[in-house]
Image (cartoon, rainbow, N blue to C red):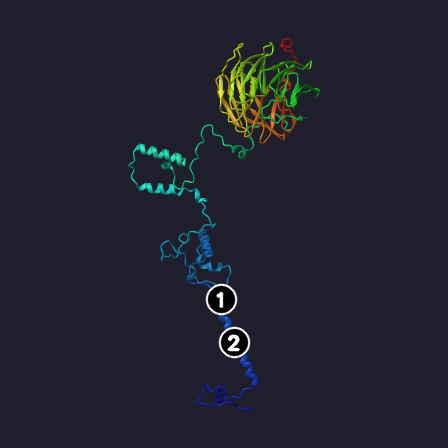
């Protein structure tokens, strides 16, 4: 074993440091020296890793900084609940739970409004700190700032310090400008007003998009009806080749319980009791078709209007045509009887009165419409004639005295914004008239023919195609088109909805009431006829129908 000196070690390393104080070293076993070198290397590596961990450790307590948000929230909740020792235990609420904070460090509070000033809470009341909003992101009070009208708000704030030296005339002028431009008076507006009051539409203005984007259910009544009204039709009949034309009147129910229906160029009769079907009229022209049908009050004569302008009168018992009256040049879409006077409305807007007892049948002409007459009804007492046209006008005419060729309407109503086809007189109050407007109007209005006033109106939110009154109840039923295709029963006079009958797949074209007043018949563009038992008669008040012979049985030539 050799003994080495410090000089030898230094010289072996390149003689970088040779010292003069040489002394002998203790002999070292080679294995021991190697183990010491390994331990020194391990210790150096451990110290290096420890230093790196201390640098990367972020969960150590920060004694000089403000409290974290979760600590402030916890401190606020504890102070509200009355805790007196919140600040001492704040560090124990740390989610990581790595170290305990001292009492002095936990008493640091969030900065107040004045920089550099802090207060140490002495009680639960003084330790309350205003919390941040529970939901971050977005303004809770003004969701859309584009509609806040900041310019108006700035004007209202800035004008408070100005002196008012304006004349009354200038103030009125500014008010008028403000109403026209903004829709409200700026002088009376509020700061940060979201929006002004919308401008009222001009009188008579109709929005074409109203029909497409405002369809909904008809307004219902809060009062429930006490009687039972079936929601399903009692019977469904086929009506092939019926014309889907809003301006035609293709069904009518006679007092002898015959239902007349115009299908194409034919007129069929259906007996409600026996179910017998009879082909009464068959027009000869290929392009000709039935445009209107109407029964006389006694029920044995049927008037038929055609596309070619003819008005035919048929005897049902003998199944024979009695008269063919020609006075119109275009189709006759509306007919109505008043004793021996038959009134017809044509596409030209003219209404002709025919006396069916004489050879010269055309006795009078009414010219109160500029477009097609699609609604025509005589009042029950024969005093008034109501006519509705495609020109959105509803006229009330007096009865024709003798052969007076010139006549003007008693009343002309222009409130409807659509074609007026649905017209019907009240059976128990002869001066009350109900009218309904088309797609652009959709209103049902009640009129007093004596005074010319509108008694009530309701927005049905659907095209009104026909109206009939009940003879047993103070109610009326209306048939509708786009978009619900339903029947609605209304209470008179407040026009509250009693019931709604659905089933048709297309718009309802016309309605008819049975002679006993219990059943309503509806024909629609889906080529079906539906029988609705919606006015059931009280058995104690049931009346028997009596067959009456027509006073004109021997008078029509």
The C terminus lies in which quarter of the figure?
top right
* Residue 303 found in image quarter: top right
Find residue 223 and report its horizontal and vertical position in percent. Answer: 55, 28
Q: Quadrant of residue 103?
A: bottom left
Image quadrant containing the N terminus: bottom right
Quarter assignment of residue 312? top right
Is residue 339 in sight in this rendering? no
Q: Which residue is mark 1?
A: 56
Crowding around mark 2 (Cα neighbors within 10 Å: few <14, some 14 to 19, many 20+) is few
Tag shown at residue 43: 2
Q: Is residue 105 visible?
A: yes
Q: Position of residue 202 (x, y in %)?
A: 44, 30
Front-lying residue, 353 or 48: 353
Which of the two residues, 384 or 268, is positioned nearer the viewer here?
268
Label 1 close to label 2 by CB (< 8 Å)? no
Query: Going by the picture, which residue comes out furthest to the top?
Result: 554
Labels in figure, total: 2
Depth check: give the residue in front, 201 or 164.
201
Q: Earlier in the sequence, mark 1 or mark 2?
A: 2
Residue 331 screen position, x and y as percent: 59, 21
Q: Secondary structure at mark 1?
A: helix
Find residue 475 and name its label: none
Secondary element at tag 2: helix
> How far is the residue under mark 1 from the one under mark 2?
20 Å
Q: Would you place residue 208 above or below residue 264 in this image?
A: below
Count neighbours of disc 1 (C-alpha within 10 A) and say few if under 14, some if 14 to 19, many if 20 or more.
Answer: few
The structure residue drawn at horizontal position 44% and vertical position 88%, both measured from the top left corner, is: 19
Q: Nearer the viewer, mark 1 or mark 2?
A: 1
x then y, percent, for residue 27: 53, 88
Residue located farthest toward the bottom when viewing the structure as drawn: 2
Horizontal side of 204 relative to 232 (left or right) equals: left
């Amino acid at each position: 074993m050799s003994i080495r000196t410090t000089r030898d070690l230094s010289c072996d390393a390149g003689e970088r440091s040779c010292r003069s104080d040489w002394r002998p070293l203790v002999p070292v076993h080679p294995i021991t020296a190697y183990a010491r070198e390994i331990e020194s290397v391990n210790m150096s590596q451990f110290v290096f890793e420890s230093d790196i961990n201390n640098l990367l450790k972020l969960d150590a307590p920060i004694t000089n900084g403000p409290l974290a948000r979760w600590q402030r929230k916890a401190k606020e909740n504890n102070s509200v609940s009355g805790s007196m020792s919140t600040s001492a235990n704040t560090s124990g609420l740390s989610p990581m739970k790595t170290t305990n904070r001292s009492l002095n460090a936990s008493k640091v509070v969030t900065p107040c409004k004045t920089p550099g000033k802090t207060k140490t809470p002495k009680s639960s009341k003084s330790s309350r700190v205003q919390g941040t909003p529970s939901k971050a992101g977005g303004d809770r009070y003004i969701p859309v700032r584009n509609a806040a009208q900041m310019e108006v708000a700035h004007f209202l704030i800035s004008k408070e310090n100005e002196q008012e030296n304006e004349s009354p005339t200038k103030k009125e002028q500014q008010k008028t400008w403000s109403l026209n431009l903004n829709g409200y008076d700026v002088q009376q507006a509020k700061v940060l007003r979201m929006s002004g009051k919308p401008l009222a539409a001009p009188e008579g203005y109709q929005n074409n998009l109203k029909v497409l984007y405002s369809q909904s259910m008809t307004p219902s009544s809060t009062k429930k009806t006490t009687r039972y009204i079936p929601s399903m039709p009692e019977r469904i009949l086929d009506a092939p080749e019926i014309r889907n034309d809003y301006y035609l009147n293709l069904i009518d129910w006679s007092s002898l319980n015959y239902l007349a229906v115009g299908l194409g160029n034919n007129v069929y009769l259906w007996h409600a009791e026996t179910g017998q079907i009879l082909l009464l009229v068959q027009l000869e022209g290929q392009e000709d078709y039935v445009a209107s049908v109407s029964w006389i009050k006694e029920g044995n004569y049927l008037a038929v209007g055609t596309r070619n302008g003819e008005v035919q009168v048929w005897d049902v018992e003998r199944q024979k045509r009695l008269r063919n009256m020609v006075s119109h040049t275009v189709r006759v879409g509306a007919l109505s009887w008043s004793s021996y006077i038959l009134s017809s409305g044509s596409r030209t807007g003219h209404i002709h009165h025919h006396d069916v007892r004489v050879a010269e049948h055309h006795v009078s002409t009414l010219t109160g419409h500029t477009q097609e007459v699609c609604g025509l009804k005589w009042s029950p007492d024969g005093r008034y004639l109501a006519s509705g046209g495609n020109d959105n006008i509803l006229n009330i005419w007096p009865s024709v005295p003798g052969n007076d060729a010139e006549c003007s309407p008693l009343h002309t109503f222009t409130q409807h914004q659509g074609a007026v086809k649905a017209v019907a007189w009240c059976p128990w109050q002869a001066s009350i008239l109900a009218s309904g407007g088309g797609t652009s109007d959709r209103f049902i209005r009640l009129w007093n023919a004596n005074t010319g006033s509108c008694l009530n109106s309701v927005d049905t939110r659907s095209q009104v195609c026909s109206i009939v009154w009940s003879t047993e109840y103070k109610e009326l039923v209306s048939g509708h088109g786009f978009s619900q295709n339903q029947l609605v029963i209304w209470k008179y006079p407040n026009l509250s909805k009693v019931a709604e009958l659905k089933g048709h797949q297309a718009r309802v074209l016309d309605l008819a009431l049975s002679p006993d007043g219990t059943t309503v018949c509806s024909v629609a563009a889906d080529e079906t006829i539906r029988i609705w038992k919606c006015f059931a008669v009280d058995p104690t008040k049931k009346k028997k129908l009596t067959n009456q012979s027509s006073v004109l049985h021997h008078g029509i030539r």
